[in-house]
Amino acid sequence: MRELDIMDLNFSHPLRAELHNELHARPSLYFEGDTDVWHVAIVDDNRQPCVPSCLSSLEGLWITQQGKHGIARYMDGRIKWELHAEFLTLTFVTAPSEQSAVPPESFLKLCALVEGQTIAAIHVRVRDEKCGKRTDEPNADCVASEVGGGDAEVHSNFRLDQNGFVEMILFNKSLNAYRTGRMVRRLLEIETYRMMALLAMPVARRTLLELAGYDRRLSRLIAHMQSATKVDKALLSEVTSLSSDVLNFSATARKRFGAARAYAEIVASRIEEIREGRVEQRQRIGTFIGRRFQPAIRTCHAAERRLDELSERVRLAGDLLRTTVQVQLEDQNASLLAAMGERAKAALHIQQAVEGFSVIAITYYVIGLVKNVLESVSELGLIRILRNLYCSWQSRLFSLPSGGAFSTSADPIRRLVESVT
């Protein structure tokens, strides 16, 4: 047996490397100094967006085994992409320019290569404040928070600018390149996942409207079931139709509600990770998002809960109807069995009567047959011959000494012959 090398993977689980590298599957872009970060999230309602093929030929490419995440040099900066279950994100990091408020044309062209629609677009201006001076000043209507335990400060009004981007300003006080990259990433994820979670809002509104109609149909159905003396085809058809409609609608809505719940949990987790602190005279970012984002998520939860309740009520109505049908079938079976028992009794009486008539008929036919036989024998003269034989036999018996003993035994034969003649 050969000696195993400690690095020999022949005995390793086939998924070991893939599962181990999952820790490094989503790296952050690290940078320091003044930087502009442009981030776009693209969704496609029909299918998962595809990563532009041109990214695989860029210089300095780092890519995961599945190709879902990668970083490369692009134009005068670096590009990062992440392919998620429902959307694709492109993040472009570049140095500030004279037109920092305008997204780079090269980045917009790259985004145009992806089929789908933009669901989130964020522009983060990272400005170094280690010297104690600010080159950019936030707007007066911005919300703000100290992040990273007070090592940075974030300002944003969470409004779309004229280019369709949400602008954030990160004043870096003492974050190094690694912490700055991770902090910017968390800010981008807060806005991206917030928007992805809110995709459930139109579904929730439509669900609440549809549920009102389904509730009315179910109420009419239950009233019909209570007043109906028996289950008819129309009632069965209505129950089947309602159950099918609720099931089809629920299958679509549940998927969106489940995704919204997962995205909302990520938003809450990222807000907690940035370790917010108060900025004087400013509302905190987490508080601002929570007061406006959480009611929308609660609406989605309420719609999902009502959908679950309606599905359960429809299921109970179907069970009640099936129970009613089963009871009716059992009653019908009992009636059929009772009728079959009555018919069996009648058949038995008829059989007994037929048997009695058969005995009479057979007796009648046997008597007639015997009569015919005797008449035939009489016509052939056999009776006279039998009488002569009898007389001869009797005379012989009388001539015997003990004839008296036989005369008694011969009388029955004589009487039989005489009765026939």
Image (tube, rainbow, N blue to C red):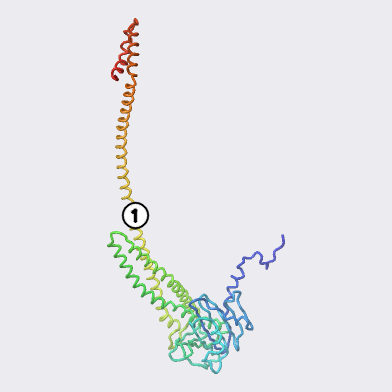
Front residue (pair 370, 355): 370
Closer to us: 338 or 413:
413
Q: Quadrant of residue 92?
A: bottom right
Give the percent coordinates (x, y) of residue 358: 32, 34
Q: Amino acid at mark 1?
A: Leu
- Front residue of 148 and 20: 20
On the rendered image, what quadrant is the C terminus found in? Answer: top left
The mark total stands at 1
Kindly identify which residue carries mark 1: 329
Q: Residue furthest front?
A: 380
Residue that extends furthest to the right in the rendered view of this protein: 2
- Which residue is depicted at the point 47% across and 83% down? 277
Q: Position of residue 50 (x, y in %)?
A: 55, 78
Q: Residue furthest bottom?
A: 98
Q: Nearer the viewer, residue 129 or 58?
A: 58
Counting from the top left corner in percent of width and height, residue 319 is at 36, 61
Quarter of the figure with residue 342: top left
Q: Is residue 412 above or below residue 291?
A: above
Image quadrant where one finds the N terminus: bottom right
Q: Is residue 274 left or right of residue 379?
A: right
> In the shown orientation, is residue 111 left or right of residue 350?
right
Q: Residue at x 59, y 79 (%)?
A: 70
Give the left or right position of residue 381, taking residue 56 as reference: left
Q: Tell me where residue 41 appears, x and y as whole percent.
A: 51, 81
- Secondary element at tag 1: helix
Dot 1 crowding, Cα within 10 Å, few <14, some 14–19, many 20+: few
